[in-house]
Amino acid sequence: MDDFRWFFYAAGAYFLVLLSLRLYHLGMVYSYYPKLLIWQQPFYYPLYCIHKLAAVAYWWSVLRNTAYISHEPRLYTPECLTML
């Protein structure tokens, strides 16, 4: 499980940033704020940039762990398959 620690950290951080960005955006939309002016809100653009950086970290960890799993034969033993 220690091999996948960074994936769980990245997934949790990505989910929290994604959720906060979407809730902030939905709050603006439901308060009838003009769509193009949402970008001029004080926290939207920095939150959007943080979201994109978190997405890069998340997808990097997904690709890294997928490559690790596909090249690690010890994960395909009968003991590991029965843990599922």
Image (cartoon, rainbow, N blue to C red):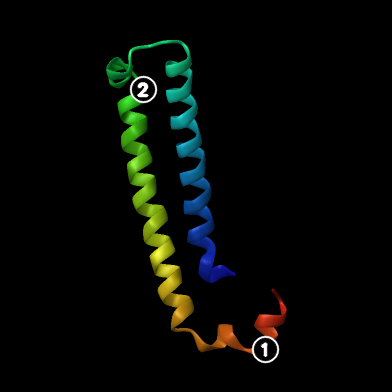
- Label 1: which secondary element: helix
Tell me which residue sits at (49%, 60%) in the image.
7
Q: Are marks 1 and 2 in contact (CB under 8 Å)?
A: no
Residue 16, given in percent of the width and then of the height, sits at: 51, 39
Residue position for label 2: 43
Crowd class of label 2 (few under 14; some 14 to 19; many from 20; radius 10 Å): few
Residue 33 vertical placement versus 25 (above, below)? above
Amino acid type, residue under disc 1 in the picture: Pro
Amino acid type, residue under disc 2 in the picture: Phe
- Label 2: which secondary element: loop
N-terminal label among 1 and 2 = 2
Residue 74, given in percent of the width and then of the height, sits at: 56, 87
Q: Quadrant of residue 66?
A: bottom left
Residue 18, given in percent of the width and then of the height, sits at: 46, 38
Residue position for label 1: 78
Q: Which mark is residue 3?
A: none
Residue 48 vertical placement versus 36 (above, below)? below
Q: Nearer the viewer, residue 57 or 63?
A: 63
Real-space Cα separation, disc 1 to disc 2, in angstroms: 50 Å
Tell me which residue sits at (47%, 23%) in the image.
26
Residue 80 vertical placement versus 13 (above, below)? below
- Image quarter of the C terminus: bottom right
Tell me which residue sits at (36%, 60%) in the image.
60
Which residue is at the far top? 32
Residue 41 vertical placement versus 22 (above, below)? above
